[in-house]
Image (cartoon, helix red, strand yellow):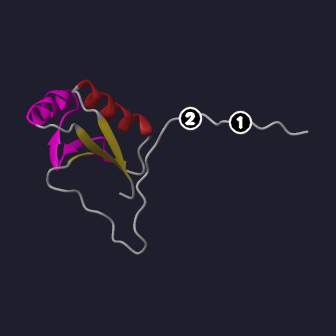
Amino acid sequence: MVVLPERSTGLPTLLPQPAPGAAPATPDDRDIVISVNKDLSISINDQPIALADLPERLSAIFAARATKVIFVRGHHDLEFGAVARVIDAAKSAGVIQVGLMTQW
Protein backbone atom coordinates (compact mmCIF):
# COMPACT_ATOMS: atom_id res chain seq x y z
CA MET A 1 0.00 0.00 0.00
CA VAL A 2 1.28 3.47 -0.92
CA VAL A 3 0.18 6.64 0.85
CA LEU A 4 0.51 9.88 -1.11
CA PRO A 5 -0.19 13.34 0.25
CA GLU A 6 -3.17 15.14 -1.27
CA ARG A 7 -1.30 18.43 -1.42
CA SER A 8 2.34 19.23 -1.60
CA THR A 9 3.64 22.27 0.21
CA GLY A 10 6.60 24.45 -0.52
CA LEU A 11 7.65 27.95 -1.35
CA PRO A 12 5.94 29.73 -4.24
CA THR A 13 8.39 30.47 -7.03
CA LEU A 14 8.24 32.08 -10.43
CA LEU A 15 10.96 30.95 -12.78
CA PRO A 16 11.25 32.68 -16.14
CA GLN A 17 11.68 30.33 -19.04
CA PRO A 18 13.95 31.41 -21.89
CA ALA A 19 12.58 31.36 -25.40
CA PRO A 20 13.94 28.46 -27.47
CA GLY A 21 17.13 29.53 -29.22
CA ALA A 22 17.19 32.92 -27.49
CA ALA A 23 20.48 34.60 -26.66
CA PRO A 24 21.22 35.14 -22.94
CA ALA A 25 19.68 38.35 -21.65
CA THR A 26 22.00 41.22 -20.83
CA PRO A 27 21.22 43.40 -17.82
CA ASP A 28 19.35 46.65 -18.43
CA ASP A 29 21.18 49.88 -17.49
CA ARG A 30 18.57 50.48 -14.80
CA ASP A 31 19.19 47.06 -13.26
CA ILE A 32 21.40 46.83 -10.21
CA VAL A 33 23.76 43.88 -10.57
CA ILE A 34 25.99 43.02 -7.63
CA SER A 35 28.90 40.78 -8.55
CA VAL A 36 30.83 38.69 -6.05
CA ASN A 37 34.16 37.80 -7.64
CA LYS A 38 36.39 34.80 -7.07
CA ASP A 39 38.68 36.88 -4.81
CA LEU A 40 35.59 37.87 -2.73
CA SER A 41 35.66 41.45 -4.05
CA ILE A 42 32.25 43.00 -4.65
CA SER A 43 31.04 45.42 -7.28
CA ILE A 44 27.78 47.19 -8.08
CA ASN A 45 27.38 47.44 -11.86
CA ASP A 46 31.15 46.98 -12.23
CA GLN A 47 32.00 49.66 -9.62
CA PRO A 48 34.04 48.16 -6.75
CA ILE A 49 32.64 48.50 -3.23
CA ALA A 50 33.42 47.03 0.19
CA LEU A 51 30.87 44.75 1.82
CA ALA A 52 30.67 47.09 4.83
CA ASP A 53 29.68 49.99 2.54
CA LEU A 54 27.11 48.00 0.54
CA PRO A 55 23.96 48.66 2.64
CA GLU A 56 24.56 52.42 2.70
CA ARG A 57 25.23 52.57 -1.05
CA LEU A 58 22.16 50.49 -1.89
CA SER A 59 20.00 52.65 0.38
CA ALA A 60 21.18 55.71 -1.56
CA ILE A 61 20.52 54.03 -4.92
CA PHE A 62 17.02 52.90 -4.00
CA ALA A 63 15.97 56.11 -2.21
CA ALA A 64 14.55 57.48 -5.46
CA ARG A 65 13.36 54.20 -6.99
CA ALA A 66 9.96 52.60 -6.71
CA THR A 67 11.21 49.08 -7.36
CA LYS A 68 13.76 47.65 -4.99
CA VAL A 69 15.17 44.76 -7.02
CA ILE A 70 18.76 43.60 -7.39
CA PHE A 71 20.47 40.80 -9.24
CA VAL A 72 23.36 38.98 -7.60
CA ARG A 73 25.99 37.23 -9.67
CA GLY A 74 28.51 35.05 -7.86
CA HIS A 75 31.57 33.36 -9.32
CA HIS A 76 30.98 29.65 -9.82
CA ASP A 77 33.92 28.71 -7.55
CA LEU A 78 32.51 30.55 -4.52
CA GLU A 79 30.71 28.98 -1.62
CA PHE A 80 27.15 30.23 -1.32
CA GLY A 81 27.95 31.86 2.04
CA ALA A 82 29.82 34.65 0.25
CA VAL A 83 26.76 35.37 -1.89
CA ALA A 84 24.45 35.07 1.13
CA ARG A 85 26.38 37.82 2.94
CA VAL A 86 25.74 40.15 0.00
CA ILE A 87 22.04 39.23 -0.02
CA ASP A 88 21.81 39.91 3.73
CA ALA A 89 23.46 43.31 3.27
CA ALA A 90 21.01 44.13 0.47
CA LYS A 91 18.01 43.07 2.56
CA SER A 92 19.20 45.30 5.41
CA ALA A 93 19.23 48.20 2.91
CA GLY A 94 15.56 47.63 2.08
CA VAL A 95 15.89 45.54 -1.08
CA ILE A 96 12.67 43.59 -1.57
CA GLN A 97 13.50 41.19 -4.40
CA VAL A 98 16.76 39.43 -5.16
CA GLY A 99 17.43 37.59 -8.39
CA LEU A 100 20.33 35.18 -8.72
CA MET A 101 22.21 35.21 -12.01
CA THR A 102 23.88 32.07 -13.31
CA GLN A 103 26.50 31.12 -15.91
CA TRP A 104 29.25 33.52 -14.96
Q: Nearer the viewer, residue 72 or 63?
A: 63
Question: Seen from this angle, which residue lies furthest bottom?
Answer: 21
Residue sitting at 14 percent across and 29 percent down?
Answer: 59
What is the x, y in percent for residue 68?
22, 36
Q: Which numbered circle lies on residue 46?
A: none
Residue sitting at 25 percent across and 42 percent down?
Answer: 70
Tell me which amino acid carries mark 2. Answer: Gly
Residue sitting at 15 percent across and 37 percent down?
Answer: 66
Residue sitting at 39 percent across and 54 percent down?
Answer: 102
Q: Nearer the viewer, residue 64 or 77?
A: 64
The quarter of the image holding the C terminus is bottom left
The quarter of the image holding the N terminus is top right
Dividing the picture into quadrants, the one containing residue 94 is: top left
Q: Which residue is mark 2?
A: 10
What is the x, y in percent for residue 6?
71, 36
The label nearer to you, 2 versus 1, is 1
Q: How far apart are labels 2 and 1 at the CA level?
A: 14 Å
Is residue 86 shown above or below 102?
above
Q: Is residue 5 left or right of residue 83?
A: right
Q: Which residue is mark 1?
A: 6
Tell me which amino acid carries mark 1. Answer: Glu
- Magenta stretch holds residue 37: yes
Element type at marker 2? Answer: loop
What is the x, y in percent for residue 25?
29, 63
Q: Is residue 3 left or right of residue 27?
A: right
Whether residues under marks 2 and 1 lie with C-beta atoms below 8 angstroms apart, the answer is no
Question: Seen from this angle, which residue lies furthest top?
Answer: 92
Question: Seen from this angle, which residue lies furthest front?
Answer: 6
Q: What are the residue bounds of the magenta stretch?
A: 35-64
